[in-house]
Image (cartoon, rainbow, N blue to C red):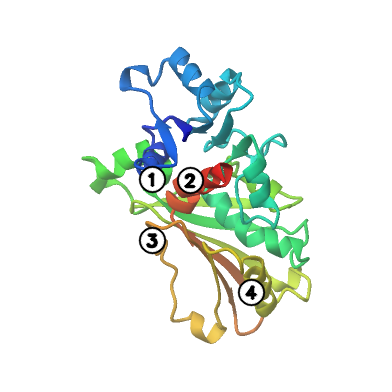
Amino acid sequence: MTRIVYIDGDQGTTGLRIVQRLRGRQDITLRLLPDDQRKDPLRRAEALNACDVAILCLPDAAAREAVGWIQNPQVRVIDASSAHRTDPGWVYGLPELEAAQAGRIAAASRISNPGCYPTAAVALLRPLRDAGLLPADVALSIHAVSGYSGRGRAGIDAYEGAGAAALPALQVYGLALDHKHVPEIRQHARLTHRPLFVPAYGAYAQGIVLTVPLHRALLPEACTLQRAHEVLAGHYAAQARVQVEAVRPADAAAMHLDPQALNGSDDLRLTVFGDARGEHLLLAAVLDNLGKGAAGAAVQNLDLVLG
């Protein structure tokens, strides 16, 4: 018998993408509620308790509520919201985090899908932290630009609606410096201090570029361009979806980072840049916020759960 996968919140940006990816698969039975039942708590609770795997594509409060409705101990949950990403009772759904993480996900009953920005930031920082190239108390600033689909339906309606021409090409937000992804990045990158995170939306549909500048004078002497690249390349050597590049200072001037370069894929590209004087490093990541940053990650975790 095929296993039943129920998507709660299938009409949201992430939910729609997951449905597209799962529809037609022969190894699962995809369960969706009809339009007139999608917001009915009773019908949703019934569906949650009658499935093998529930994928939650809901706002944080609604995700917590949905989990509370689950009484069937056999139901396994993949939560795409940020409600449980720092909860010690949930397994963090980034299979590439460390060697044992994919096995933990495969065995878990509660999996929290990573955020799109944290996927990029943690993927860059965690291996360097574990290798001792970044101290736990390092002061970090993280800058990122996402396509407007990162705002969900509101962003898509705004930039693809009648008033799109009046919107700015770039909107920096999170200026209260308390973005909800900061605790997630801090915990899973194993940082003592909250990183300074400055996100932005661009006037394009999807794709993220995230950068982390580093002053080498504030880091261990061993944290060189070559060594940082070696650590990242070694960490992800067996990960088919993660590409790691190192760029010589002489080559960097002719390069650019395109946030849309990996759109339509579940890949993640990590690059280490350095200046000719050896004073600075720049860690950079590119991914599709709707691919590896959301729906693609959920399906990757589902496949691990299904074996």
Comparing 179 with 51, the one in front is 51
What residue did someone put label 2 on? 299
Label 2: state its secondary structure: helix
Q: What residue type is labelled 4?
A: His
| Furthest residue toward bottom | 250
| Furthest residue toward front | 1
Q: Earlier in the sequence, mark 4 or mark 2?
A: 4
When asked about the image quadrant of residue 29, the answer is: top left
What residue did someone put label 3 on? 260
When asked about the image quadrant of residue 69, the answer is: top right
Q: Position of residue 47 (x, y in %)?
A: 47, 21
Label 4: state its secondary structure: helix
Label 1: state its secondary structure: helix
Task: Measure the C-alpha gap from mark 3 to mark 4.
Answer: 23 Å
Contact? badges 2 and 3 (CB < 8 Å): no
Q: Which mark is residue 229?
A: 4
Label 4: how many Cα within 10 Å (few below 14, some 14–19, many 20+): many
Q: In this view, does 161 lie to the left or right of 139?
A: left
Q: Choose mark 1 or mark 4, whichever is in front.
A: 1
Q: Choose mark 1 or mark 3, whichever is in front.
A: 1
Q: Is residue 57 visible from the viewing direction of this image?
A: no
Q: Residue at x 66, y 66 (%)?
A: 235
Task: Measure the C-alpha gap from mark 2 to mark 3.
Answer: 21 Å
